[in-house]
Amino acid sequence: MCSRPKRRQRGLSLVEAVVFIIVVGIGVAGIALLFNQMTRGSVDPVVRKQALAIATSLMEEIQLRGYTFCDPDDANVYTAASPAACAVQESTSSPGPEAGETRYAEPRFDNVNDYHGFSMSGAGLKDITGTTIPGLGAYSASVSVSEPAGAEVLSGVPSTEQLRIVVTVTGPAGISVSLQGYRTRYAPNSP
């Protein structure tokens, strides 16, 4: 009797091939998911930078407005040392624009607290002339102006002599940027 030595078979069994395909498939799916998240995340800095630029611009516009005892239309605006010296007082107890004032046309917002409650959304952002800015339709902005309280109060300045400004800009994918700034009363101050 002649016995033949048994040869080892070469190749993969069906089970081994299926397991290999499943492992490779899971690996490729994981890499594709990671690549998708990286691609989506790479757009995030652009949106965040744009939102920050919008918020900074609006904050600067607001902080450049006056904050005095009198409404800026009052002749005593630069000399009044108290609200009693004003013909037309600027109300800090109920912030917001005076009747008829807007950001876009005369009579314009002329005091920091006129911006309280201001928002831009829906039709896109507009510049100070009321012209819609192309490419910013997916962004919205809102402003809150109030007297600071507690730890927010700037040291050495009474809380009644300062305002806290919060500008919040929301962009695509829910990315939100919020800036906080302060403005102190500067009257009386000769021009």
Image (cartoon, helix red, strand yellow):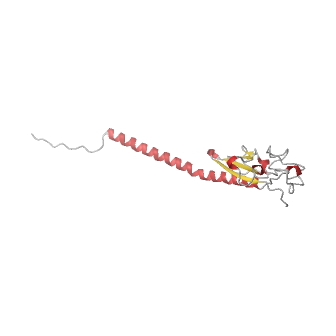
Residue 16 pos. (x, y %) = 33, 41
In the image, is 26 to the left or to the right of 121?
A: left
Label tally: 0
Residue lying at 33% horizontally and 38% vertically, measured from the top left: 15
- Judged from this view, the residue extending furthest toward the left is 1
Residue 131 pos. (x, y %) = 77, 51
In the image, is 38 to the left or to the right of 140?
A: left
Task: State the quadrant of the C terminus.
Answer: bottom right
Task: State the quadrant of the N terminus.
Answer: top left
Residue 136 pos. (x, y %) = 69, 49
User: Which residue is at the front of the view, 124 or 184?
Assistant: 184
- Judged from this view, the residue extending furthest toward the top is 15
User: Which residue is at the front of the view, 100 or 166?
Assistant: 166
In the image, is 73 to the left or to the right of 184?
A: right
In the image, is 67 to the left or to the right of 41?
A: right
User: Which residue is at the front of the view, 149 or 92?
Assistant: 149
Residue 155 pos. (x, y %) = 71, 54
